[in-house]
Amino acid sequence: MTIEISIVAPIYNEFDNIPELYRRVKAVMDAQGLTWELVLVDDGSTDGSTERMRELARQDKRVRPVIFARNFGHQIAVTAGLDYARGAAVVIIDADLQDPPELIPDLIAKWREGYEVVYAVRAEREGETWFKRTTAALFYRIIFRITDVKIPLDTGDFRLLDRKVVDVLGKMRERHRFLRGMAAWVGFRQIGVPYKRAARFAGVTKYPFRKMLRLALNAITSFSYFPLQLATYAGFVSAGIAIIAIPVVIALRLAGSQFFGGQATTLIAVLFLGGVQLISLGVLGEYIGRLYDEAKGRPLYIVREEPEK
Ligand code: UDP
Ligand code: MG
């Protein structure tokens, strides 16, 4: 049987959300009269989500759990979902129901019109803290500014991808993944559909500040050299200042002025440049560390239990 739509949901301790996710996806998809499957990727859950997914799969063969050997992170879990999905189009959705499954028919409608990537745009957000909303808004704008790919603003991973796009993404095995950037990078015909991002149905966010920061760093380093170039710019600026300052200081000294005297001036200049150099080293380190990770060529994820064929 060919499958028209695969729905991929990454799951990390979403015990209370799984039944509701299944219920709503089933209601929407059955009403569409399409053949579909729900690929649930268990990203090392420890709260019993795994057993819940197995149970669902026993009841309904369209539910296909992919169970990881440990927690690999959201972007990797989605990647595995794309690898296992068999549909002619794949919808990526969060398991916490912040992305309403009821929007899927709208995504499918655009796909039928010929678009290969249909991403959902967060027109409104509810139930998220001021901090999350502000940092998210800032994040999308910085990424948009400094990266070479025009990643659409205020879009998450909630989107529909045509089989062609899924196959291309499947060949991009980079370790530090920023899927929405990668999906923008591949091109194809793309369009956005606005939606209202709901509050979580149950549970708490699995994206603490630390993980958000890592995702932001991955997004920037995967799509931009800007942080590396900053060191070059800073170098030119400080060299420029020195070239101007040297004759000025000499002239002032010859004229008998003590204006640039004293240890404090020297100390400040040394500390400032030392700081800039250390930051530049750190930036270099971020890129080199990522290179090192790629060089090791380890698998992106390890599956403990595969879904039934
Ligand atoms: N998630 C995951 N692995 C992780 C963190 C999150 O698979 O290490 C899943 C999580 O279960 C959810 C989705 O990714 O389905 C989005 O996470 P969350 O809702 O916590 O992020 P937020 O919406 O708060 O940004
Ligand atoms: Mg969420």
Image (cartoon, helix red, strand yellow):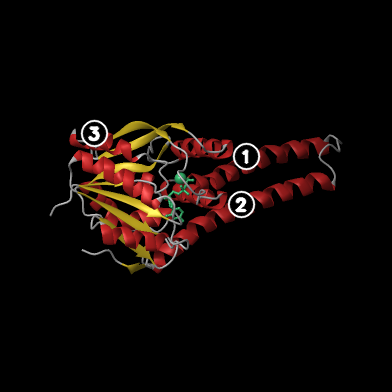
- In what element is the residue under mark 3? helix
Above or below, 30 relative to 62: above
The quadrant in which residue 195 appears is top left
Above or below, 208 relative to 70: above
- In what element is the residue under mark 2? helix
Q: Horizontal and vertical percent for residue 153?
A: 42, 34
Q: Few, some or many C-alpha atoms within 10 Å of disc 2 (few <14, some 14-19, many ≥20)? A: few
Q: Quadrant of the C terminus?
A: bottom left
The quadrant in which residue 15 appears is bottom left
Amino acid found under the numbered disc labelled 2: Ile
Q: Tell me the mark number nearer the camera, choosing from 3 and 1.
A: 3
Distance (Cα) linking label 3 and label 1: 54 Å
- In what element is the residue under mark 1? helix
Above or below, 92 relative to 194: below
Amino acid found under the numbered disc labelled 3: Lys
Is the C-beta separation of discs 3 and 1 under 8 Å?
no
Taking the spot 85% from the left edge, 45% from the top edge, the residue there is 262
Q: Earlier in the sequence, mark 3 or mark 1?
A: 3
Q: Horizontal and vertical percent for residue 239?
A: 63, 43
Q: Label 3: which residue?
A: 110
Q: Horizontal and vertical percent for residue 224?
A: 44, 46
Q: Horizontal and vertical percent for residue 167?
A: 23, 52
Residue 279 disc label: 2
Is the C-beta separation of discs 2 and 3 under 8 Å?
no
